[in-house]
Image: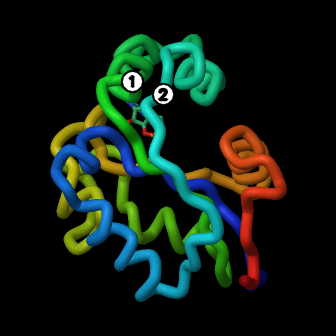
Amino acid sequence: MAIERTLSIIKPDAVAKNVIGKIYSRFETNGLKIIASKMVWLSAQEAGEFYAVHKERPFYKDLVAFMTSGPVMIQALEGEDAIAKNRDLMGATDPKKAEAGTIRADFATSIDANAVHGSDGPDTAKVEIGFFFPGMNVYSGR
Ligand code: CMP
């Protein structure tokens, strides 16, 4: 295992439910350190660009509409095995299939309103962190 970084987004549904702190607490109690964070109301262009990899998927339009429906909380997380650990904490993309005790099982309502996003691998994590946080806004080890 290695120290990794991953990008996490608390989506508009979870921000509206007022559970940012509860989700941050899960990161922190599981060894993930918040090394950058900001609240943003994404434009359609920003959300579309972030999710460009899904451009051809049938859910792309709804995904962009949902992600721009309210503010999101965006953070970079750092820790041992951070990418897989964050994905374990989130649970399956579809909250109906997410294991009990995961963020999506506890806070999400549908595959669209699924509370959180997390990078799915090291390459994606690097691109996604760079997309939202220029290097000087990441505070590793401080
Ligand atoms: P996220 O991890 O943010 O990555 C893409 C998002 O698309 C995903 O979470 C879901 O919220 C949304 N989505 C909607 N339908 C699907 C689907 N059929 N498969 C995967 N993701 C979907």
Name the kind of residue labelled 2 in the image. Leu
Q: Residue at image x 35%, y 78%?
A: 25
Mark 1 and mark 2: Cα distance apart in space: 5 Å
Q: Assess mark 1: CB under 8 A from ligand 1?
A: no
Q: Which residue is mark 1?
A: 68
Neighbour class for label 1 at 10 Å: few (<14), some, many (≥20)? many
**Rendering coords of residue 127 (x, y %):** 77, 43
Mark number, residue 138: none
Q: Residue at image x 36%, y 54%?
A: 92
Whichever of callouts 1 and 2 sits on the residue coming sooner in the sequence is 2
**Front in this rendered view, residue 138 or 109:** 138
Left or right placement of residue 48 versus residue 116 in this view: right
Name the kind of residue labelled 1 in the image. Thr
Q: Quadrant of the N terminus?
A: bottom right
**Rendering coords of residue 88 (x, y %):** 45, 69
* Residue 12 found in image quarter: top left
Tally of numbered tags: 2
Ligand 1 sits in quadrant: top left
Q: Quadrant of the C terminus?
A: bottom right
Q: Residue at image x 28%, y 56%?
A: 104
Neighbour class for label 2 at 10 Å: few (<14), some, many (≥20)? some
* Residue 7 found in image quarter: bottom right
Q: Is residue 127 above or below residue 20?
A: above
Disc 1 + disc 2, Cβ < 8 Å = yes
Q: Which residue is mark 2?
A: 42
**Front in this rendered view, residue 104 or 136:** 136
Q: Residue at image x 36%, y 77%?
A: 26
